[in-house]
Image: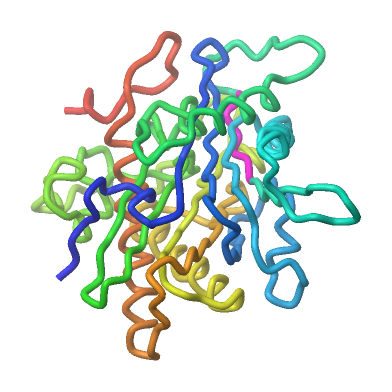
């Protein structure tokens, strides 16, 4: 029987804090997961149009074993600047690996496309994401805002505002797993035009409305609803993306962390339809703090990977559920749908 952690946030995983920085006029922002100590990490990219930084070093065959933070940012390719701001903040704190007398923080990052969301993107010569990244580190805490916050500030789904979501699960063996997602997909998180979430079977308590599935299923449940479809902009590569982090306090190798990231993509499939399209840059970072000291048996590993998908599906739904209205919104929030 799955149950949530005390906060039902990724920060229920010991050793992690999360910081958001947002710009309401810009309708964009940055979310940073800050590691109290360097952690084992992996990544899996399944979307066709990713925007990333420092993901190659996370592959199991490469030499860097641990990282200091991960960054999720709006801004499309401009948002990759956010990682530089996070690096600057960590360097000021003396955080990083010592290389030839220099302190180098390792900060992988991924971005989503939120340029076309009604915000004012006339930022002048340089985009603001480096400063937003810096500010997100200063805001890092175990409690943080969901919905229209951080990297989810300007996120959109098919027909609804997206947002920043998070969830956690406590396993019977004492391991905690948590998920964080900036939800901005091509597809829809709800069943057709209803208020019911595709991820309903995985909901714990009343995390996102407790509506279950609609009965009977509506005719448009089988209709592929795509963001922007039908207007002159059409679908464009790189115009969407759900970017996420899955984390655990179990002891994992770098290869096992990659397997955790792969399994967490099951949550995308359970919560978004369609997902992993050529127009999405869908990506999951995986973090293993090892704080529980628990090394998994083969059976326990299967439980962990199953929980990764379920927890991610819940986090994605909670991000849309928690979104709030703002000026110049292109799409309504979930709470306004009837």
In the depicted structure, whether residue 146 falls above or below residue 205: above
Q: Residue at x 38, y 78 (%)?
A: 294
Q: Quadrant of the C terminus?
A: top left
The outermost residue toward the right is 100
Query: Against 115, is 244 above or below?
Result: below
Residue toward you, 149 or 87: 87
Please state the horizontal and vertical placement of residue 114, each as a whole percent of the image.
Answer: 57, 29
Task: Please tell me in which quadrant of the rendered image residue 63 appears.
Answer: bottom right
Snapshot quadrant of residue 331: top left
| Image side of residue 14 versus residue 258, left or right | left
| Whole-percent x, y for residue 48 in the image | 64, 55
Front-lying residue, 125 or 119: 125
Residue shown at 65%/41% (left/top)?
A: 238
Which range of residues does the magenta coloring cover? 110-115
Q: Nearer the viewer, residue 335 or 8?
A: 8
Q: Overall secondary structure of the magenta stretch?
A: loop
Q: Quadrant of the N terminus?
A: bottom left
Q: Is residue 145 above or below residue 288?
A: above
**Residue 319 in the image, given as x and y percentages of width and height:** 35, 39
**Relative side of 175 to 114, left or right:** left
Outermost residue toward the left? Answer: 215
Near-viewer residue (158 or 201):
201
The percent coordinates of residue 171 (x first, y second) are 25, 71
Q: Is residue 258 left or right of residue 131?
A: left
């Amino acid at each position: 029987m799955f149950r949530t952690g005390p906060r039902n946030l990724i920060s229920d995983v010991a050793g992690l804090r999360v910081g958001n920085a947002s710009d309401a006029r810009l309708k964009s922002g940055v979310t940073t997961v800050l590691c109290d100590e360097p952690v084992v990490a992996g990544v899996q990219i399944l979307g066709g149009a990713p925007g990333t930084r420092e993901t190659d070093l996370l592959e199991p065959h490469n030499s860097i074993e641990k990282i200091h933070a991960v960054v999720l940012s709006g801004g499309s390719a401009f948002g990759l600047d956010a990682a530089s701001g996070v690096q600057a903040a960590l360097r000021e704190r003396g955080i990083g690996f010592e290389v030839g007398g220099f302190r180098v923080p390792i900060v992988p990052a991924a971005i989503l496309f939120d340029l076309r969301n009604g915000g004012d993107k006339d930022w002048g010569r340089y985009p603001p994401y480096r400063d937003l990244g810096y500010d997100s580190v200063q805001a890092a805490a175990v409690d943080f805002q969901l919905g229209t916050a951080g990297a989810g500030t300007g996120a959109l789904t098919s027909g609804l505002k997206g947002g920043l979501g998070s969830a956690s699960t406590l396993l019977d063996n004492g391991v905690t797993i948590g998920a964080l997602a900036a939800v901005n997909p091509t597809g829809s998180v709800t069943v057709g035009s209803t208020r019911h979430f595709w991820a309903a079977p995985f909901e714990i308590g009343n995390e996102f409305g407790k509506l279950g599935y609609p009965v009977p299923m509506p005719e448009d449940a089988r209709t592929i609803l795509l963001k922007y479809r039908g207007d002159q902009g059409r679908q464009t590569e790189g115009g969407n993306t759900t970017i996420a982090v899955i984390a655990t306090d179990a002891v994992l190798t770098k290869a096992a962390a990659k397997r955790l990231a792969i399994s967490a993509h099951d949550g995308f499939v359970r919560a978004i339809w369609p997902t992993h399209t050529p127009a999405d840059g869908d990506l999951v970072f995986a973090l293993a703090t090892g704080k529980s000291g628990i090394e998994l048996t083969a059976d326990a590993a299967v439980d962990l990977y199953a929980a990764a998908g379920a927890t991610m599906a819940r986090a994605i739904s909670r991000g849309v559920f928690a979104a709030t209205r703002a000026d110049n919104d292109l799409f309504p929030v979930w709470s306004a749908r009837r």
